[in-house]
Image (cartoon, helix red, strand yellow):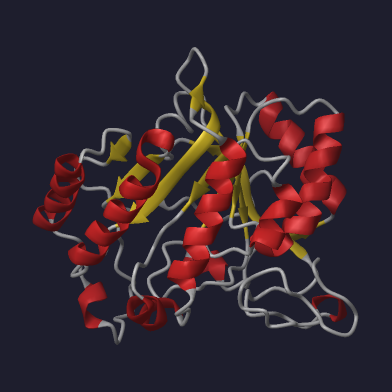
Amino acid sequence: MISDKNEGCRLCPRQCKAKREQGIKGVCGTADELLVARAALHMWEEPCISGTKGSGTVFFSGCPLRCVFCQNREISDGSAGKAIEEKRLTEIFLELQQKGAANINLVTAGHYADRVARALREAKQRGLTIPVVWNSGGYELLETLSLVADLVDVWLPDFKFFSTETAMRFAKAPDYPDIAKKAIAFMVEKAGPPVFDEEGYMKRGVIVRHLVLPGHRKESEDIIRYLYETYGDRIYLSIMNQYTPPKEPLPERELNRKLTRYEYDKTVAFAMELGVTNAYIQEGETAEESFIPPFTGEGV
């Protein structure tokens, strides 16, 4: 990890400097163990990621952002997941390829970036040829992204918050907007323009996801405007309506309900009026448990 015995871990923007190699957990909720909660074919990503084959998705436990509304809150605090060695992670990548996965999809792997990079290099030496997807919350340092930059083909970051106030309220990360902008710029530079294969799967490129939050349509519009005016058709947007309220009510009262159809439709209409054409949108009622897979250790 980007650390030393004196300073501790500095892999994420939190810079908590936890001495994880000594068993001390960082803000991400993890210590030195490499924790994986699920490794299986996942059918619910964007069409160019999952398609009909399924995305070979590896869900890592822990997260340095820890949003109050986290959709994967079951694993984001690092309390779930199976501890594995790097060599087992390499085997998982190869097993997913053998199962016919369209790609290897690394979900929230930043706090393990150094170990994931080593496992990927070994897997590629042993015959891994399918694209690698970096699926993240967008809250990442350029130094950390550089550890995997030559191994990743498709970047799939979130852009969650545009204002420092919202980022502070929902993730205690007022620096999130600035960090995410820099991370996405890095990803676009590394990936170049989007490239698809003959079956419609993305081989290289950037898809920026944005989950529209109830009561925050204006913030969604700010994010969409920024991304389109900055990158145009060099990236794809994925405008999501699958916000799922937590079972326990939050102090942030507007988050205790689902997104309305009106809020989502107005957000999509704004994107279209702006001129956005490279975008994925969701139809119907997607805020369902079916979009959150069971974290039972499958494939680990």
Where residue 140 appears, x then y in whole percent? 59, 63
Looking at the image, which residue is at 71% across and 68% down? Answer: 11
In the image, 10 versus 119, the foreground residue is 10
Tell me: residue 112, above or below residue 91. Answer: below
The number of numbered badges drawn on the structure is 0
Write down the quadrant of residue 9 in the picture: bottom right
Res 96 quadrant in image:
top right
The residue most toward the right is 5
Q: Nearer the viewer, residue 154 or 177?
A: 177
Residue 20 screen position, x and y as percent: 80, 77
Image: 233 above or below 145 = above
Q: In which quarter of the image is the N terminus?
A: bottom right
28 with respect to 180 (left or right): right
Look at the image and tell me whether residue 239 can be seen.
Answer: yes
Judge whether 164 appears above or below 143 on screen: below
Q: Is residue 31 left or right of residue 14?
A: right
Where residue 144 sits in the image (x, y, percent)? 70, 60
Question: What's the residue at 61%, 68% (across, down)?
Answer: 62
Q: In this view, does 36 lie to the left or right of 162?
A: right
Pick the front one: 115 or 148: 148
